[in-house]
């Protein structure tokens, strides 16, 4: 297969299929969680559970001091990776053009070298986290195949994107094609792996915050 | 390219009144455009002077004559034009005076007289769908290509149609168009793609072939000297790309300021050609300089890259309707699964059996 045919294939039908699987999968899982719901609390709360939920979503972005003291690498590298990935995904002009095309919304982009640096930092953070995961006995014990698969699926789009921007080794068509293909793999894996935490994280934060927001029964 | 009973390029140039100084200047320009070291200029001059005028047969198949326009018009009159004069162009539909049977006779004679030594230039793609789609003097393009290629020393596939199929091959490819290299496998083929190729690139490739034989080619059969540079890497608007400054429409402030044309569909990042360095119209400018993005015309399949005005990063078939449709399916499936789960939960409640500590411990160990 020539690089051009490959690029046309991954940009065309394969991308549509991957996005469909991603959207159907994510919506299906969220719809399932939300429609199942939780047992209704018949007691009238003293506080405001809903407000507590929203507050908790925001509050947990702040680093917990106890966790930080115990596990500096996870917290620092974790933050660097997530912020870097957010910048790369949502603030690169090429990605914004794609979002505008698919969803009709757009926003300003960052200068390309800034995004490039974010990509490098994200990749470094991922490598640090992997070494940490492998070298700490407890983390290693807790890790399953799914965790490593998710690591690879997240790392590859960053690496191939970096290579595409810098025109490394292969032709730009091959590189762009491989980059898009790696993103498609990520999209397909997303709803069926721990990557779903991107969405479920906010549900569980809200739920925790809501139960703390009960503050007992109104008397 | 050996023994021809014809004057050498040097003799021909002197006959045309071209001074040695002008000739060396031309060789210098040619050497720099081919990225040759300055020490190669005298060697190029010597080799070109001694080169015999090869017979050239130019076949035009499914094409628009834009490639011929490019070579004849843009740099004329110039030394490149004269170098082109110094090949013996024995057959070319558009340029030759002869017509009809006389023209075909000229081709036959040139082939017989220089069998195994002539250079074949092809522009246009070859239809495989139906022989009648494109014929010359009643002969199908496929038959004529095979027949003429047999006696050629080398083939230059001029323009993207001959090199990779080009516009005729664009989806849905109604004529079954293919490139020269898809049919001819036993002859050296130099692809000189572009829609059309840059004139100096065409003459440069011919001059290189006369002086040194086949040039070094890339993985797509293109001379590396001219197709070794990425348009995006050589673009004078690249600093704007780096700074994240893009023209959003063709007449906004960004376009007036000369910002990057990526969002307007510029295919520079995936295109290899000499436009940004040699430029067009005697070195005046190139498309991006005129305010239009690169359309990637020197790359295979450029017509099917998902729209000339769509950024390179856009998917070619996904639309927001797909996303809405998928969301609908997801919600419906989610609600259905939730209903099933609820039912399962209620059944479990009815048939529930108490669990003791030992069982729980066993579950944890699993």
Image (tube, coloured by chain):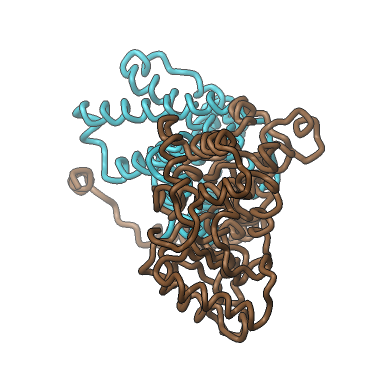
Front one among B240 and B41: B41
Front one among B304 and B314: B304
The spot of residue B132 in percent (x, y) is 61, 85
Residue A26 at least partly seen: yes
The spot of residue B204 in percent (x, y) is 53, 47
Q: Is residue B251 above or below residue B115?
A: above
The spot of residue A57 in percent (x, y) is 55, 28
Tell me which corner region of the image, top left, top right, bottom left or bottom right, holds residue B348.
bottom left
Tell me which corner region of the image, top left, top right, bottom left or bottom right, holds residue B244.
top right
Residue A192 at least partly seen: no
Would you say B205 lies left or right of A127 here?
A: right
Q: Residue at 29% of width from left, 31% of height from top?
A: A130
Q: Is residue B79 above or below residue B256?
A: below
Chain seen in brown: B
The spot of residue B177 in percent (x, y) is 55, 72
Q: Residue at 37% of width from left, 16% of height from top?
A: A68
Q: Residue at 74% of width from left, 38% of height from top?
A: B248
Front one among B325 and A65: B325
Q: Residue at 26% of width from left, 28% of height from top?
A: A131
Front one among A12 and B265: B265
Give the total of numbered labels.
0
Chain seen in cyan: A
The N terminus of chain B - image quarter: bottom left
């Amino acid at each position: 297969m020539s690089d051009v045919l490959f690029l046309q294939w991954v940009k065309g039908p394969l991308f549509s299929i991957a996005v469909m699987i991603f959207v159907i999968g994510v919506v299906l899982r969220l719809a399932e969680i939300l429609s199942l719901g939780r047992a209704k609390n018949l007691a009238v709360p003293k506080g405001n559970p809903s407000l507590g939920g929203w507050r908790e979503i925001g509050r947990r972005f702040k680093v917990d001091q106890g966790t930080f003291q115990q596990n500096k690498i996870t917290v620092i590298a974790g933050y660097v990776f997530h912020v870097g990935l957010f910048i790369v995904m949502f603030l690169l002009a090429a990605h914004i053009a794609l979002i505008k095309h698919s969803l009709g919304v757009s926003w300003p982009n960052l200068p390309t070298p800034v995004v490039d640096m974010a990509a490098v930092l994200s990749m470094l953070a991922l490598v640090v986290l992997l070494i940490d995961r492998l070298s700490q006995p407890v983390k290693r014990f807790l890790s399953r195949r799914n965790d490593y698969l998710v690591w690879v699926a997240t790392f590859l789009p960053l690496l191939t994107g970096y290579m595409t921007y810098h025109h490394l080794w292969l032709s730009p068509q091959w590189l762009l094609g491989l980059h898009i293909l790696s993103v498609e793999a990520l999209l397909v894996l997303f709803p069926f792996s721990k990557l779903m935490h991107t969405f479920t994280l906010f549900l569980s934060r809200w739920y925790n915050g809501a139960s703390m927001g009960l503050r007992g029964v109104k008397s | 390219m050996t023994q021809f009973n014809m004057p050498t390029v040097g003799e021909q140039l002197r006959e045309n009144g071209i001074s040695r100084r002008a000739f060396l200047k031309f060789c210098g320009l040619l050497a720099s455009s081919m990225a040759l070291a300055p020490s190669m200029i005298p060697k190029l001059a010597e080799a070109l002077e001694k080169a015999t005028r090869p017979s050239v047969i130019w076949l035009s198949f499914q094409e628009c004559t834009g490639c011929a326009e490019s070579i004849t018009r843009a740099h004329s009159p110039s030394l490149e034009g004269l170098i082109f004069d110094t090949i013996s162009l024995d057959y070319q539909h558009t340029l030759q005076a002869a017509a009809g049977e006389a023209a075909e006779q000229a081709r036959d004679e040139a082939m017989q007289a220089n069998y195994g030594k002539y250079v074949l230039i092809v522009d246009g793609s070859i239809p495989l769908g139906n022989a009648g789609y494109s014929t010359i003097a009643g002969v199908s393009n496929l038959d004529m290509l095979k027949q003429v290629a047999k006696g050629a020393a080398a083939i230059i596939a001029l323009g993207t149609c001959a090199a990779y199929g080009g516009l005729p091959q664009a989806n849905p490819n109604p004529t079954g168009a293919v490139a020269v290299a898809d049919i001819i496998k036993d002859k050296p083929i130099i692809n000189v793609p572009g829609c059309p190729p840059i004139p100096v690139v065409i003459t440069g490739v011919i001059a290189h072939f006369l002086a040194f034989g086949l040039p070094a080619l890339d993985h797509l059969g293109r001379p590396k000297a001219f197709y070794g540079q990425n348009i995006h890497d050589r673009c004078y608007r690249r600093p704007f790309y780096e700074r994240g400054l893009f023209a959003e429409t063709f007449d906004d402030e960004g376009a007036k300021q000369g910002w990057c044309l990526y969002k307007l569909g510029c295919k520079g990042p995936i295109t290899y050609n000499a436009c940004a360095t040699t430029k067009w119209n005697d070195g005046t400018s190139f498309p991006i300089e005129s305010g239009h993005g690169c359309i990637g015309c020197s790359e295979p399949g450029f017509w099917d890259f998902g729209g000339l005005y769509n950024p390179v990063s856009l998917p070619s078939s996904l639309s927001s309707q797909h996303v809405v449709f998928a969301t609908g399916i997801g919600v419906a499936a989610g609600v259905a699964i939730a209903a099933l789960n609820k039912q399962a939960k209620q059944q479990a409640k009815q048939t529930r059996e108490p669990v003791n500590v030992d069982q729980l411990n066993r579950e944890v160990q699993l």
